[in-house]
């Protein structure tokens, strides 16, 4: 049936990117703009919004506070036809400011929910010391829902100062659909900050 | 010396989280060159003396940045004026102003180029010196200090800042930066490194003005007697003109701002110069003659810019874009080509006519922003005197066309204080608006249309037919604003006006001479950063000028005689003083001078030798 086919031509791509070094000082909005412009240069058959200022149909994983590095952030983009994802990845990387890098582009099967649905938990690696020689804390935050927690509050409880100041660094290691996966990536053990109760809890993988 | 770069880097990583919009200070924009500092023969730092968001939107510096970086013997870095929070931190930690890409102090560059875009940026320019630690006066600098180069429209009367500059480029910079680079490259190889000798050599290049080689002599009444050239420097200094813009199709890969900027888009300069001949407009005289780029070259430039940036908008810039010979064809082809890429084509300047409105409609220019027209004056006689060749009928027609295209928001620009303006002329603005809103004769009223009437104070500028006239006094501006407030009190009209004290300082600096320099220094030390409204202080300016024993009104409100030697007479923009005077007389008589692009040559003097009016070649 031709109608079905034409509908099937649009698909979703999941773009995984990292944000390190200088780029960690770009705001969420600035990061989105840079990535959107790189997408425009990627050669992907983007779907655009209607209206006077058409924009590619993109959604991003939850905002990252300024000064926090990230290893695996995501954006989801709608495309209108077949795409050479490896070529698109290379092109995007030539079109991004230093510190932003596309790690992988993957076609999302239809049964996988939207990014906004599964991006529930963030895992943060907090390192004491200037050169990563100090203690490492794994911290998990809820990125949506009732227990959504602010990174700054969690760090305050842990006795750290402002993000970006000397003495420690913060990296968001990944974004996960479940607590279990987040803790697993942390090596089976992490601190969970409950943003509703405003308390830190120790989590172990086998308890979950 | 090596430690300094690391200091700056450490400073940045330790403090960026404390400042607003740290993206301004990173220097890692897409298309930045990052050429090596140590192995480059000639190192330029290009400075826009205002915020990143403004500097990144400036086309001239973008062009020079690419030209210099594409040369094998040179590199260009850039810097903007940091916001006050960053300035405070830098001062606290002893960090000098630095190039964003190299993270090296400006002091360590060979050449520091500063663009003079507006008089109200002059105090900012001095702040650049204060933050960078570069000695303020050209005469205080030694062999190890950078050469400070000025450019932009302000170079046509840089006298209030002249002592701070080693040299200035009058006119187009594309070729001049190459010439300067070559001379400096050879000079660096010379054992003596004699700075004065270098300046002597530079002043022989076309378009280069070395202020220290010109000594002003004043009469007892304070006016200039003469400007005496020294060291065999040329008199006058003729501006540099790029004969054929097709030979420099820049920018090709413009920097993509990391932070949302004022003009966050690709700018395609379709031509330079304007010969409409509006008598108040300095740009209309100093950039003559009109030189259009060819359509095919423009299309290629547009493609390359969009390919290399991912910008979602491209703007056709010039002093009056609808005047481009093949504008219909260019706009149509560009819009067609950009449609599949979802790139918007826009037109920043609109003439007051139906054609322009239709063109803007075709380009699907952003509706929300609304349209802008600049009738400048409401009464017919005043419009004739400024040579604004539109009548009220044109405006009606343009507005009706806009109305039927669906626009409901229009901004109208007017000036007050034009030479010969009477009270009736000011009242006429309100009457004109009333006529427009109510409809007239066969013209329908524009129901639901909203007007923003924006009023600026006329500031007489050098190298224009009005360079001799008096600028309105502050009480007089206040009085006329009052009249406007009363007469523009009507539904559907919002009245906005420029700060009159800012216009007064603008007037002071526009026609100032070298004696003002210490006053500008005082004002800058007192914290004036005039463009940043909250840092503007008229009383600081007043005090600073008074303390130097000078009188603001003498500069601003005094009418000059025809024969007076003006502080910028030794700087030649091509248009002769006699022509300007005859234009002034025609203004008083209300006579129009037609545009030489469509009519006979008016004999302004801008076309000489190879330099001539150059229209776009016919299509393929």
Image (spheres, coloured by chain):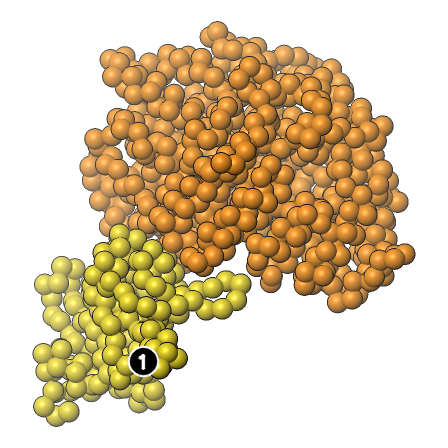
Chain colours: A yellow, B orange
User: Split into 4 quadrants, where in the image is the N terminus of chain B?
Assistant: top left
* Residue at point 34%, 18% (across, down): B183
Residue B219's quadrant in the figure? top right
Q: Nearer the viewer, residue B85 or B415?
A: B415
Left or right: residue A205 versus residue A145 is left
Percent x, y of residue B290:
59, 29
Question: On what subunit does the disc labeled 1 rest?
Answer: A
Q: Nearer the viewer, residue B261 or B311?
A: B311
Left or right: residue B385 versus residue B118 is right
Badge 1: residue crowd in 10 Å (few <14, some 14–19, many ≥20)? some
Question: Helix, strand, or loop for circle 1?
Answer: loop
Above or below B85: residue B216: above
Q: Residue furthest front?
A: A1
Left or right: residue B205 versus residue B511 is left
The number of numbered badges drawn on the structure is: 1
Percent x, y of residue B524:
52, 39
Identify the residue position indicated by label 1 in the image. Answer: A114
Q: Visible in this render: residue B518?
A: no
Q: Visible in this render: residue B53?
A: yes
Percent x, y of residue B50:
48, 44
* Residue at point 69%, 54% (across, down): B411
Left or right: residue B468 versus residue B315 is right
Above or below B558: residue B66: below
Percent x, y of residue B289:
59, 26
Above or below B416: residue B160: above
* Residue at point 57%, 22% (across, down): B612
Residue A42's quadrant in the figure? bottom left
Residue B148's quadrant in the figure? top left
* Residue at point 13%, 59% (across, down): A131
């Amino acid at each position: 049936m031709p109608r079905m086919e034409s509908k099937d031509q649009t698909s979703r791509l999941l773009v995984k990117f990292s944000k390190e070094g200088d780029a960690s000082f770009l705001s969420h909005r600035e990061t989105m703009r840079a990535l959107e412009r790189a997408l425009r240069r990627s050669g992907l058959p983007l779907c655009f919004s209607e209206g006077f200022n058409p924009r590619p149909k993109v959604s991003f994983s939850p905002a990252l506070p300024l000064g926090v590095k990230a290893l695996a952030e995501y954006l989801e983009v709608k495309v209108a036809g077949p795409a050479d994802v490896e070529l698109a990845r290379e092109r995007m990387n030539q079109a991004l400011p230093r510190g932003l890098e596309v790690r992988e582009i993957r076609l999302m099967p239809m049964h996988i929910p939207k990014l906004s649905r599964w991006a529930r938990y963030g895992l943060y690696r907090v390192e004491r010391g200037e050169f990563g020689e100090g203690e490492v804390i794994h911290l998990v935050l809820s990125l949506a829902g009732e227990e959504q927690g602010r990174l700054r509050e969690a760090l305050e409880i842990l006795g750290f100062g402002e993000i970006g100041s000397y003495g420690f660094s913060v990296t968001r290691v990944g974004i996960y659909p479940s607590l279990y996966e987040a803790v697993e990536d942390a090596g089976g053990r992490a601190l969970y900050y409950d943003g509703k109760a405003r308390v830190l809890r120790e989590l172990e993988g086998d308890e979950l | 010396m090596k430690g300094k770069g690391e200091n700056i880097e450490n400073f940045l990583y330790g403090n960026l989280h404390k400042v607003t919009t740290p993206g301004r200070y990173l220097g890692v924009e897409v298309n930045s060159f990052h050429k090596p500092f140590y192995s480059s023969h000639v190192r330029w730092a290009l400075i826009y003396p205002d915020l990143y968001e403004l500097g990144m939107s400036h086309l001239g510096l973008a062009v020079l940045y690419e030209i210099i970086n594409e040369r094998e013997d040179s590199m260009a870095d850039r810097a903007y004026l940091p916001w006050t929070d960053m300035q405070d931190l830098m001062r606290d930690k002893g960090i000098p102003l630095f190039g964003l890409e190299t993270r090296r102090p400006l002091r360590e560059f060979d050449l520091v180029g500063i663009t003079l875009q507006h008089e109200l940026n002059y105090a900012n320019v001095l702040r650049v010196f204060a933050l960078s630690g570069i000695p303020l006066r050209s005469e205080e600098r030694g062999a190890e200090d950078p050469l400070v180069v000025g450019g932009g429209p302000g170079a046509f009367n840089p006298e209030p800042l002249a002592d701070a500059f080693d040299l200035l480029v009058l006119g187009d910079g594309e070729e001049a930066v190459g010439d300067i680079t070559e001379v400096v490259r050879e000079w660096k190889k010379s054992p003596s490194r004699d700075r004065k000798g270098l300046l002597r050599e530079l002043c022989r290049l076309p378009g280069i003005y070395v202020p220290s080689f010109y000594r002003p002599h004043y009469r007892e009444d304070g006016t200039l007697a003469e400007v005496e050239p020294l060291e065999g420097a040329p008199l006058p200094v003729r501006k540099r003109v790029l004969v054929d813009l097709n030979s420099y199709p820049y920018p090709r890969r413009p920097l993509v701002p990391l932070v949302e900027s004022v003009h966050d888009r690709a700018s395609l300069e379709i031509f330079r110069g304007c010969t409409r001949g509006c008598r108040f407009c300095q740009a209309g005289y100093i950039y003559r003659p009109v030189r259009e780029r060819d359509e095919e070259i423009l299309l290629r430039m547009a493609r390359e810019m969009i390919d290399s940036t991912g910008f979602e908008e491209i703007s056709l810039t010039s002093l009056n874009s609808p005047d481009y010979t093949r504008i219909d064809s260019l706009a149509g082809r560009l819009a067609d080509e950009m449609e599949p890429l979802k790139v918007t084509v826009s037109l920043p300047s609109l003439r007051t006519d139906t054609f322009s409105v239709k063109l803007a409609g075709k380009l699907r220019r952003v509706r929300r922003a609304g349209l802008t027209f600049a009738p400048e004056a409401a009464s017919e006689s005043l419009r004739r005197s400024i040579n604004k060749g539109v009548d009220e009928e044109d405006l009606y027609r343009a507005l009706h066309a806009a109305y039927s295209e669906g626009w409901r928001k229009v901004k109208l620009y007017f000036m007050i204080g034009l030479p010969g303006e009477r009270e009736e002329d000011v009242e006429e603005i309100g009457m004109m608006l009333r006529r427009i809103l109510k409809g007239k004769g066969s013209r329908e009223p524009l129901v639901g249309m909203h007007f923003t009437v924006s009023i600026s104070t006329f500031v007489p500028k050098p190298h224009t037919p009005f360079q001799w006239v008096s600028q309105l006094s502050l009480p007089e501006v206040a009085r006329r604003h009052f009249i406007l407030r009363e007469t523009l009190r009507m539904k559907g009209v919002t009245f906005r006006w420029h700060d009159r004290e800012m216009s007064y300082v603008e007037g002071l600096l526009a026609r100032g001479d070298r004696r003002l320099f210490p006053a500008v220094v005082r004002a800058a030390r007192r914290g004036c950063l005039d463009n940043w409204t909250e840092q503007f202080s008229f009383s600081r300016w007043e005090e600073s000028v008074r303390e130097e024993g000078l009188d603001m009104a003498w500069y601003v409100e005094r009418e000059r005689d025809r024969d007076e030697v003006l502080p910028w007479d030794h700087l030649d923009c091509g248009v002769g003083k006699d022509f300007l005077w005859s234009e002034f007389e025609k203004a008083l008589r209300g006579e129009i001078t037609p545009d030489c692009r469509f009519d006979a040559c008016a004999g302004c003097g801008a076309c000489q030798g190879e330099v001539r009016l150059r229209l776009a070649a016919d299509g393929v």
